[in-house]
Image: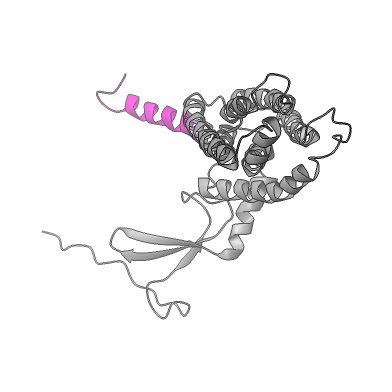
Amino acid sequence: MAPPPPPPPMHNNSLNGGGPQMRYESYQHHGVAPGVETQIRPTSPGHVEMDIRDDQILLQVKACMMERQGFMQALVAFTASAIVINTLSTNFQALLLTSHPGYASASDLAFDVSIFGGSFQMIIMTASLIVGKSADITRAYYSVIIALLICGAFLLAECGIALDPYNGIEERWVLLVTAFFIGPLQPVSTEMGVDIVYPISENTVLCIQQLFANLCSSVIIPIFASLQNVGTADGARPQYYYSFYLLICIHAASTVYFSLFSGRYRRYEHEILHKRSSSAVMEQQPGGFG
């Protein structure tokens, strides 16, 4: 019986104190951007750890935003949804008080805020799960996001109208319906972004989207509050009337920009090619499909 093969040689490396050699490799199958170097480190038989150098993270961001056509549209849709949700959540109590000025006590207002505020977040979560799962299966990201953006813009206009306590429209219920259409924009936009920038990892995509969404929300929320009394001097319009115009304009502009999408679903294309190659291999094997 032949002796077992010798173990692979261990190379000394001045950078790691003479241990197993660590090297930098360009992306092959690790979910980072092409050209981004990664450090591969063996830890135990059959296991390795991978480190991405800090200066390479910026290259992944650049690859997403500059080298992947269509990612910016997904980023804008995600950001528009986050701006609206964060702004409405921050001003929920003020909006209820504006549309229902006759609360008997502060405890009644607090009760409504807790009930409808919690329902607002639950609807966002439920709708995101349902719509996000459906879009992930059908890969109809573009159609779903366009429909949600258009419906969201009309519902935001309805929210502005419902602020008037004398028009017979319940602001609370309109806000809940708005949550159902605007909430799913975030998970669907994230999945779309991941499909576009493949093979860059989903964590990178989500970090970029969250960063821009939080930065833009921190700018828009104070502006929304500063417009609350604009046009209310004559009493013809309720507070926050023009504040909703701001959100409507953001949503409408995002819809127009997103409609210009012309990117590729790289992950979907990769899966199709993989299935075709697997089918071809099975057909060539004895007892295969052929």
Give the quarter of the image for residue 106: top right
Query: In x, y percent, where is residue 108?
Result: 56, 37
Q: Position of residue 56 (x, y in %)?
A: 59, 60
Nearest the viewer among 228 and 129 is 228
Q: Work out which quarter of the rendered image holds the N terminus and state it.
A: bottom left
Q: Is residue 80 visible?
A: no
Q: Which residues are magenta?
A: 270-290
Task: Give the quadrant of residue 100.
Answer: top right
Q: Is residue 256 visible?
A: yes
Farthest-out residue, front: 104
Label the magenta part by its dominant secondary structure: helix
Q: Is 96 left or right of 275, judged from the image as shown?
A: right
Residue at (28% x, 62% y) in the render: 45
**Relative depth, front residue between 288 and 28:** 28
Percent of width and height locating residue 201: 51, 47
The mark tally for this picture is: 0
In the image, is 139 to the left or to the right of 234?
left
* Quadrant placement of the C terminus: top left
Which residue is outermost to the left?
1
Residue drawn at (78%, 40%) of the image: 228
- State the colouring used for the structure image: one colour
- Percent from the top left, x then y, of residue 214? 65, 49
Q: Quadrant of residue 243?
A: top right
Q: Per the image, is 282 magenta? A: yes
Tell me if 46 is positioned left or right of 94 in this view.
Answer: left
Depth check, front residue: 248 or 265: 248
Which residue is painted at 39% across and 27% down in the image? 280
Q: In the depicted view, which residue is nearer to us: 286 or 97? A: 97
